[in-house]
Amino acid sequence: EDQNGDGKNDAIFVYEADGERLREEQHDTDFDGRLETEASYQNGVLVLKTLDRAGKGQPDRVEHYAAGKLERVELDEDGDGRLEHWNFYDPEGRLEKQETDSNGASKPDTFITLFPATGKIARALSDANGDGKVESWRTNDESGATTQLEEDKNQDSKPDRVVHFAAGQPDSF
């Protein structure tokens, strides 16, 4: 389909054998001759959408859907071809969890759980040394204020130091 009248296909639609339900679609959203958005459907319901926002010929945003609702988004923010961020959504479409690869190891090292209603951080876990084990656990209340910080200083996967907070300030160790 030529959506901008320049004589070139800007959108491609593929239907199921019944000719009714969409199976795939591709779009050249900026009309540069490349199809940077692709979507896949099962039984006419969206299940996967990939976007090449940077124009490098590979997706830098991958959206996963369940029952037609956004479930997870994977992002390559720096354009190196590897995913750095994974965002997970609740059934109402609210962001509820984030995972980040901050050291380029192609696996998450920071894990954030959010209060979906407010978007504030409920819990943050961190693998600072990249060994695949969490060394820091931070728990917050619904306002986003830290209530507890746990740290594993000797790398045995158990907290060695626990700090309790009151009114956002360290209260007891």
Image (cartoon, grey):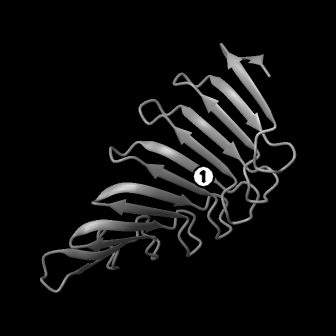
Q: Position of residue 149 (x, y in %)?
A: 72, 31
Q: Which quadrant of the view contains residue 47?
A: bottom left
- In the displayed structure, 125 sits above or below 47; it is above
Q: Residue furthest bottom?
A: 17
Is 35 in front, or is 51? 51
Q: Secondary structure at mark 1?
A: strand
Q: What residue is at 53 percent from the left and 31 percent from the top? A: 120
Identify residue for label 1. 99
Q: Position of residue 11 (x, y in %)?
A: 32, 74
Q: Amino acid at mark 1?
A: Glu
Q: What residue is at 51 percent from the left and 67 percent from the top? A: 52
Q: Which quadrant of the view contains residue 49?
A: bottom left
For mark 1, does the 10 Å Cα neighbourhood hold few (<14), some (14 to 19), or many (20 or more) residues? many
Q: Residue furthest top?
A: 167
118 sits left or right of 26 in the view: right
- In the displayed structure, 21 sits above or below 88; it is below
Q: Position of residue 77 (x, y in %)?
A: 62, 57
Q: What residue is at 40 percent from the left and 65 percent from the top? A: 29
Is 146 in front, or is 42? 146
- In the displayed structure, 51 sits above or below 95; it is below
151 sits left or right of 32 in the view: right
156 sits left or right of 41 in the view: right
